[in-house]
Image: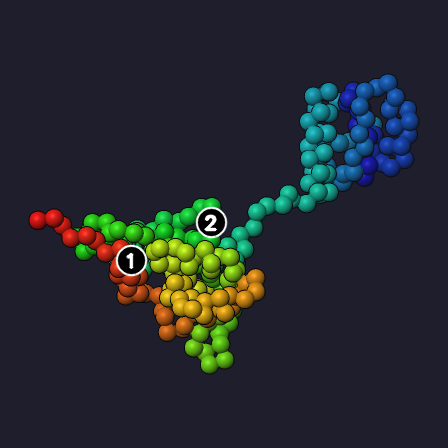
Amino acid sequence: GFYAVCGTGVHERGREGARFFCNRHGNGRGWLVIISQPTSSPGWTNGRSRGKPGDAMRTEDDLRRIDLAKQYPPPPRKQRTRAHLLADLSVNHVEKFALRCGFAVQRLSPDYGLDLEVITFDERGFREDGVLWMQLKATDALKTSRDGKAALVRIERRDILAWIREAYPVILVLYDGARDLAYYLSIQDHFAGHGIFAKLSGRTVAVPVPTENLLNEAAMREFARAKTAVFPPKRRLP
């Protein structure tokens, strides 16, 4: 049914009654609201009734909230997508093996082309020189070469050029979310030699990551040895 409500606490039920009430009491009597509400709603009586102003205000507010709830959908909220989850899973996958080796992992935020900084320690727990850089890519639909020996991932050319200039190793990690596995590629080793620019044509480059390069604890320790070899520690003075 339809109800007319004004600030004086006067109510009128019914479509025609509400229209009549608007014409008669709408001008000069304060605010006037017409609300659609079932006839069985509490606080209403058949025909016209008068109540306390406080009761009318509470009833009008309750009905207005109900009416707004029906008319307007809930506000939009942030959604956690599969891509967000894959990104976190890839980081967790790398961190797991690094921590098992006793290394420390720092997430880089904001990300300017590198995701993780890995600090390594020797068997006695002392920090080693240098740092490992890691860039992570994650997918549920892994693309492979025809022979299946490499997983393919597209990387921006400008990122590869920046990684090549790094003194310490940059490791590209490709996480397969469907199998919970990750494969790695040493950027400096892959793009070494005189034919480097032949591999870097176009804005993006399809980089093959060998599927035999499975990320695990042994691989993390090998990264640490390669990093230490960049600038070998000087011999102690006698």
Q: Residue furthest top?
A: 28
Q: Can residue 182 be seen here?
A: no
Query: In the displayed structure, does residue 160 sit left or right of residue 66?
Result: left
Q: Is residue 33 above or below residue 123?
A: above
- The residue type indicated by label 1 comes to Val
At which x and y percent is residue 112? 47, 50
Residue 204: x %, y % from top left: 55, 63
The quadrant holding residue 36 is top right
Question: What element does badge 1 sit on?
Answer: helix
Residue hosting label 2: 111
Residue at 40% across / 63% down in the picture? 187
- The residue sitting at the bottom extreme is 147
Kindly identify the residue that appears in the image at 45 percent across and 78 percent down. Answer: 148
The amino acid sitting under disc 2 is Asp
Q: Is residue 13 above or below residue 231?
A: above
Q: Which residue is rendered at x = 40% and y = 66% of the image?
A: 192
Quadrant in which residue 181 is drawn: bottom left
Mark 1 lies on residue: 230
